[in-house]
C-alpha cells in the first residue's frame, strides 16, 4: 500500500472509532454527573470535580422498582420472542432453501413487505384488538408482534445460510450407515447452528430495541420494556428530566448489547450482510 | 437391491416417482412455512384490513358505543389538513437528507474497513455498537449532548453561542434529530456497502490502474458500477426505515417546533387521543405512502429485488 493510502486508512479508522464511541463515552460520562449539578446546569463533556456522582446514579436506578421490572420484562420478552421466532424461521428457511413448493415466492415477498411495514400503522388496530381479547399490557401481547416483525429478518438470514450448507453430506452419512436422524443431528445441525445463532442475535437486537409496540401496547410496569420505561421516566420534576439518572439507565440497558457484540462480532457482521446483499 | 424386479416399469416409474416426490415435497414445504406465514399475516394483514374498515367510521375510544359509518370523510379530513402534508414533508425531508448523508459516510467507512489491516476486530466491534444500541438511548444521548444546560456540543462548536437552544426552533431541532438518526444507522449502511465492496474484483481495479486510471476514475468507473445492486438495496432498506422515523422524534422533541413525522402524527391520534377512526385513516395513508416510496425507489433506481433475496 502506498504511504498516502496508509495514512488515509489510519485516519479513517480513527474517524470510525470516534464516530462510534464518542456518544457512548458521552452518555457514560453524563451518568457520572451528580443530579444536583445537572439541575443547576453543567455543560462540558466530563463531570466537574464538584459535580462527580460516583456510582450514585447507578445505585438509584437499580434500586428503582420500575426500572428493575422493565429490565426483567425486556429480558424475558426478548428471549421468548427470539426463541419462538427462530424456531419458526428455521422451519420456513429450511423449506425455502431446500424444497420446491408452490408459494415460495409468496412467502419471500410477504417477508420483504413486512420488513418494510410502517409499524405505527398497526398500533391502532392492535391496541383495539389486544384490549378486546385481553392481552393488552401483557408479555404475550408484545411477544406476538415482535415475533412477526423479526421473522422476515430471521427467514432471510437463515435461508441465505442454509443455501450454503453442503446437504449432500447428509446423504453421504446415510450411505455410511447413519440413520436419517443421526445424519441430521451429527452432520446438519453443527453446520446450521452458526446461522441459527446469528439469526437469534439479530432477532434479539430487534426485540430489545423496539419502542413503538413497547409504548403502545403496555400501560403499566407489568409488561413495559426498557425503552418505554426510559422514555416515561421523568423523575420528580416533569419539566426538568433527571438527565444523569436517565443516562445511567441508558448505560445499563446498553450493557447486554455490548456484551453480545463483543462476543459475537463476526457472526453479526456475517448475518447482517449475508441476508441482504449478494449480487 | 430392488432393481431386479423393476425393469418392466422403467419408462413410467421414474416419472411417477418424481411427481409423487414433488407432491410430497410441495406439501412438506407448505407445512414448514405455514406457521411463520400465518403469524406474519396475522399481525400485519389482519390489523391492516381492520384499519381499513375502522377508517370508514367516526370512532373514538372515548365514546366507543358511538360508532358511525361516515365513508371516506376521515380521508378527506386528513388529506385536506395542512398538518398531514407538513408531517409528510418533514418525513420526506428527513428521509432524503439522512439517506444521502449516510450513503456518503457509510461508503467512506466501508472503504476504510475494506482496506484496514490493523485493529480490524476493534473497528468492526465498535461499528456494531451504534447498530445495536437502543434508538431511544441514542435519542437521549444526543438530546443531552445538544442541550444548552448540560450538553457539550455548544461548547465544542465554534460560531455557536453557549446558550443556543437547539430545540427552540425548527431547523436546529430537525438537525439534532437527524444527527441521532444518522449516527445510529450509518453502521448498518456501511456494513451492507462493505459486503458490496468485497465483490468488486481486485483484478479489474488493478487492470484499470495499469491502464492509467486515476483514483477518482477507478471509483466512478469501476467500483461504483460494480457494487450498484448493493448500493440500491442499502438505499431501499434505509429509506423505508427512515420514512418510519418515530423513536428519535418522540424522545428528542415530542413533535415540538413542527418536527412531527407521519408516524408520530398517527401515533398521537390513536394512542394519545384515542381517535381510532381518523387514526386508522392515517395508518392506511402511512402504509400507502411507504408503498409509494418503495415503488418509486424500485422503479427509479431499478433495484433488483431478486438479488436482494439472493435469488439472482
Image (spheres, coloured by chain):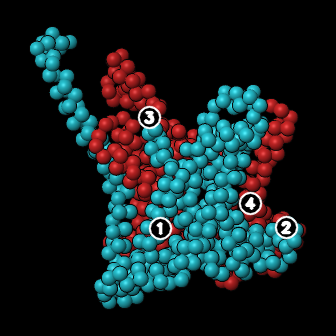
Chain colours: A red, B cyan
**Residue nearest the observer in this picture, B184 or B104:** B104
Whole-number angstrom distance, CA of label 3 to CA of label 4 = 39 Å
> Which residue matches tag 2?
B157
Residue drawn at x 34%, y 49% as measured from the top left:
A106
Q: Which of the two marks, 1 or 2, is nearer to us in this view?
A: 1
Dot 3 or dot 4, earlier in sequence:
4
Determine which residue is flagged by label 1: B289
Both labels 1 and 4 in a single chain: no
The residue drawn where x is 32% and y is 85% is: B70
Give the residue at the far left of this rendering: B8
Return the chain for callout 4.
A
Distance in Å between CA atoms under marks 2 and 4: 15 Å
Marks 3/4 in contact by CB < 8 Å: the verdict is no
* One can see residue A16 in this view: yes
Residue at numbered disc 4: A23
Chain containing mark 1: B
Q: In terms of secondary structure, where does tag 3 sit?
A: helix
Residues at discs 3 and 4 both on one chain: yes
Residue B115: image x %, image y %?
73, 37
Task: Determine the secondary structure under disc 2.
Answer: loop
> Residue A150: horizontal and vertical position, in percent?
46, 54
Above or below residue B218? Residue A219 is below
Marks 3/2: CA distance?
A: 50 Å
Residues marked 1 and 4 touching at CB (< 8 Å): no
The answer to whether the residues at label 2 and label 4 have Cβ atoms under 8 Å apart is: no
Q: Looking at the picture, do discs 1 and 3 lie on one chain?
A: no
> Foreground: B218 or B14?
B218
Crowding at dot 3, Cα within 10 Å, few <14 / some 14-19 / many 20+, comes out as: some
Q: Residues within 10 Å of mark 1 (few under 14, many from 20)?
A: some
Which element carries disc 1, helix, strand or loop? helix
Amino acid at each position: 500500500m502506498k504511504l498516502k493510502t496508509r495514512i488515509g486508512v489510519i485516519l479513517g479508522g480513527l474517524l470510525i472509532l470516534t464516530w462510534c464511541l464518542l456518544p457512548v463515552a458521552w452518555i457514560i460520562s453524563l451518568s457520572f454527573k451528580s443530579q444536583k449539578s445537572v439541575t443547576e446546569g453543567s455543560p462540558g463533556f466530563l463531570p466537574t470535580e464538584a459535580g462527580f456522582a460516583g456510582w450514585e446514579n447507578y445505585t438509584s436506578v437499580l434500586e428503582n422498582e420500575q426500572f428493575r421490572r422493565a429490565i426483567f420484562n425486556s429480558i424475558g420478552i426478548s428471549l421468548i420472542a427470539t426463541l419462538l421466532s427462530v424456531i419458526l424461521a428455521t422451519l420456513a428457511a429450511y423449506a425455502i432453501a431446500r424444497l420446491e413448493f408452490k408459494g415460495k415466492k409468496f412467502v419471500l415477498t410477504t417477508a420483504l413487505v413486512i420488513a418494510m411495514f410502517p409499524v405505527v400503522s398497526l398500533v391502532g388496530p392492535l391496541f383495539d384488538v389486544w384490549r378486546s381479547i385481553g392481552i393488552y399490557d401483557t408479555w404475550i401481547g408484545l411477544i406476538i408482534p415482535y415475533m412477526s416483525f423479526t421473522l422476515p429478518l430471521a427467514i432471510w438470514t437463515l435461508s441465505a445460510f442454509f443455501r450454503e450448507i453442503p446437504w449432500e453430506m447428509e446423504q453421504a452419512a446415510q450411505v455410511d450407515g447413519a440413520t436419517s436422524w443421526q445424519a441430521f443431528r451429527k452432520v446438519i445441525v453443527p453446520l446450521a447452528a452458526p446461522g441459527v445463532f446469528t439469526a437469534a442475535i439479530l432477532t434479539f437486537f430487534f426485540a430489545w430495541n423496539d419502542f413503538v409496540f413497547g409504548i403502545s401496547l403496555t400501560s403499566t410496569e407489568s409488561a413495559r420494556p426498557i425503552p418505554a420505561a426510559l422514555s416515561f421516566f421523568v423523575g420528580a420534576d416533569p419539566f426538568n428530566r433527571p438527565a444523569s439518572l436517565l443516562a445511567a439507565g441508558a448505560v445499563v440497558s446498553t450493557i447486554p448489547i455490548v456484551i453480545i457484540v463483543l462476543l459475537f462480532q463476526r457472526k453479526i457482521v456475517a448475518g447482517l450482510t449475508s441476508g441482504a446483499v449478494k449480487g | 437391491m430392488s432393481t431386479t424386479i423393476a425393469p418392466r416399469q422403467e419408462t413410467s416409474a421414474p416419472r411417477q416417482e418424481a411427481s409423487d416426490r414433488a407432491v410430497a415435497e410441495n406439501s412438506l414445504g407448505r407445512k414448514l412455512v405455514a406457521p411463520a406465514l400465518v403469524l406474519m399475516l396475522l399481525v400485519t394483514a389482519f390489523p391492516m384490513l381492520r384499519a381499513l374498515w375502522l377508517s370508514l367510521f367516526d370512532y373514538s375510544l372515548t365514546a366507543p358505543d358511538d360508532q358511525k359509518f361516515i365513508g371516506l370523510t376521515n380521508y378527506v379530513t386528513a388529506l385536506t389538513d395542512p398538518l398531514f402534508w407538513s408531517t409528510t414533508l418533514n418525513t420526506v425531508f428527513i428521509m432524503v437528507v439522512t439517506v444521502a448523508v449516510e450513503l456518503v459516510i457509510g461508503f467512506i467507512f466501508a472503504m476504510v474497513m475494506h482496506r484496514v489491516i490493523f485493529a480490524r476486530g476493534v473497528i468492526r466491534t465498535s461499528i456494531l455498537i451504534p447498530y445495536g444500541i437502543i434508538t431511544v438511548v441514542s435519542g437521549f444521548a444526543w438530546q443531552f449532548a445538544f442541550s444548552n444546560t448540560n450538553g457539550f456540543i455548544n461548547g465544542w462548536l465554534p460560531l455557536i453561542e453557549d446558550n443556543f437552544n437547539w430545540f427552540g426552533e425548527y431547523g436546529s431541532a430537525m438537525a439534532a434529530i437527524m444527527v441521532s438518526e444518522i449516527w445510529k444507522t450509518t453502521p448498518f449502511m456501511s456494513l451492507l456497502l462493505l459486503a458490496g465492496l468485497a465483490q468488486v474484483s481486485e483484478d479489474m481495479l488493478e487492470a484499470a490502474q495499469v491502464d492509467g486510471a486515476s483514483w477518482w476514475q477507478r471509483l466512478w468507473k469501476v467500483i461504483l458500477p460494480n457494487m450498484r445492486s448493493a448500493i440500491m438495496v442499502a438505499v431501499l432498506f434505509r429509506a423505508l426505515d427512515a420514512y418510519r422515523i418515530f423513536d428519535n422524534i418522540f424522545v428528542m422533541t415530542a413533535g415540538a417546533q413542527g418536527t412531527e413525522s407521519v408516524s408520530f402524527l398517527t401515533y398521537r391520534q390513536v394512542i394519545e387521543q384515542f381517535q381510532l377512526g381518523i387514526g386508522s385513516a392515517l395508518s392506511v395513508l402511512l402504509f400507502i405512502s411507504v408503498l409509494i416510496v418503495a415503488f418509486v425507489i424500485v422503479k427509479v433506481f431499478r433495484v433488483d429485488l431478486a438479488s436482494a433475496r439472493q435469488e439472482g
